[in-house]
Amino acid sequence: MCIVKDMKQKNHRMLDFDKNKLDPAYDFINDPDYKYPSTGYRSNTAAILPDPLSYTTEATLAKLYLHLNEENRLGFHATKQKTDRVSNNFTRKTFASRIGKDTAELESYGISHRYLPITSEFIDEVNTTLTQQKNYRSG
């Protein structure tokens, strides 16, 4: 028979569970359990925290539809989106931080026409769309 006394939850490093560390704003950098080695620039061991990634996205969408008459609608649309990403790739066997920068841009614009005949027996609706899209990547 096995009797377990004082059973405690532990993490992957066998440290006692601390519910404060579940808070997304917890300060791991100043936590003594998560300090980098004191020799050299973070030594040659693995980083204690995942590689940080930050990004900023800006997006704009515009649509304009004109009802020319009861049967015809003309539409214009445009989209522009830009995303900038920065990652600090400090992982195993890295002696200095490696900053990765990546930019992605998307531009799209087009015109559309919708025809809804009122008296046609054969046509319910006709849609015509012309769209141009450009993607740019750098980094």
Image (tube, rainbow, N blue to C red):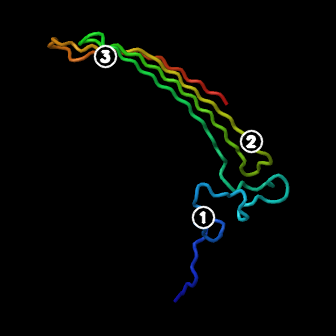
Residue 99, located in which quarter of the rendered image?
top right
- Which disc, if any, is residue 20? 1
Which of discs 1 and 2 lies nearer the camera? The answer is: 1
Vertical relation: 14 (above or below) 42: below
Amino acid type, residue under disc 2 in the picture: Arg
Query: Considering the numbered disc 2 on the image, is that residue within a helix, a strand or a loop?
Result: loop
State the residue in front, 36 or 118. Answer: 118
Amino acid type, residue under disc 3 in the picture: Asn
Q: Measure the alpha-carbon separation of dots 1 and 2.
A: 30 Å
Which of discs 1 and 3 lies nearer the camera? The answer is: 1
Vertical relation: 48 (above or below) 99: below
Q: Which residue appears at 63% of the width and 41% of the height?
A: 54
Estimate how packed mark 2 is, as few (under 14), some (14 to 19) or many (20 or more) residues with alpha carbons within 10 Å. few
- Which disc, if any, is residue 98? 2
- Which disc, if any, is residue 96? none
Q: Measure the alpha-carbon separation of dots 3 and 2.
A: 50 Å
Residue 12, located in which quarter of the rendered image?
bottom right
Left or right of 72 on screen, residue 75 = right
> Residue tagged by mark 3?
127
Q: Position of residue 16 (x, y in %)?
A: 63, 71
